Structure formats: C-alpha cells, structure tokens
Amino acid sequence: METGRSFSPAATDLLGYHRFMPDALDDLRIEVVDDDMASILRTKTGAERLAIANGMFVSARRMIASHLAAEHPDWDEERIQRETSRRISHGAV
C-alpha cells in the first residue's frame, strides 16, 4: 500500500506552488496554510473551525463518490460508499 506521494520540484513548479511560497515544500508536510488564511482561521471559534473541517470532509466524500459512480456505473450505492470510505481512510476500513 502506498503511504504517501512525493512530487519532484519540476512537478510542483508546474502546479504553481513555488510562485506563491518563499520556501520549498517539505514532501512530508501534509498541510500548508498561508499567512492570510491562518489569520482568518485564528478569528474563528473552535466550533466554527470544526464546522469548516466537516464541510471539507463531506465535500471530499461527495467528490470521491461522484468519481466512483462515474467510473463504475455498474456499482450499487453500498459499494460506492464502501470504496469511498476505504479511500478516505487510506485502506483502514
């Protein structure tokens, strides 16, 4: 099972990451928040930040499920949700 991805500097340059960030990305770093976003998040309560995270999680599940439904029109809803859960949990489900 693959545990992570490593992008070459050329690949990240193509994605435009380095145009906006002064330092190179650490391949082991999962999350990068710019200063403006960090300032906004600091003004939020814990409940508001949790609601934002939940919204992102729900959105990610929907995107994966939609992709799977399009790629596998023969799958029923239960199989799509089971595969979505497996992918979200990196195979732990």
Image (cartoon, rainbow, N blue to C red):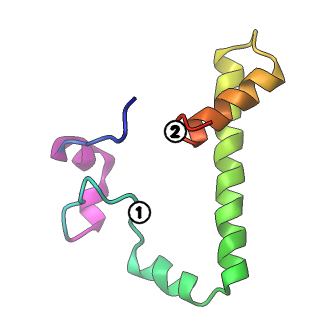
Disc 2 is placed on an element classified as loop
**The stretch drawn in magenta includes residue 33:** no
Alpha carbon of mark 2 to alpha carbon of mark 1: how far?
Answer: 17 Å
Q: Residue furthest right?
A: 77
Mark 2 sits on what residue? 90
Q: Disc 1 designates what residue?
A: 31
Front in this rendered view, residue 36 or 71: 71
Task: Check disc 2 and give the amino acid type.
Answer: His
Crowding at mark 1 (Cα within 10 Å: few <14, some 14-19, many 20+): few
Q: Is residue 84 left or right of residue 23?
A: right
**Residue 21 found in image quarter:** bottom left
Q: Position of residue 90 (x, y in %)?
A: 51, 39
Residue farthest along the bottom direction in this orientation: 43
- Span of residues in magenta: 9-22
Residue 12, magenta (yes or no): yes
Question: Outermost residue, top direction?
Answer: 74
Q: Secondary structure at mark 1?
A: loop
- Left or right: residue 32 compared with residue 89: left
Number of marks: 2
- Residue found at x 73% / y 25%: 80
Label 2 crowd bin: few (<14), some (14–19), many (20+), radius 10 Å: few
Closer-to-camera residue (47/37) = 47
Task: Give x and y (percent) for residue 86.
Answer: 61, 33
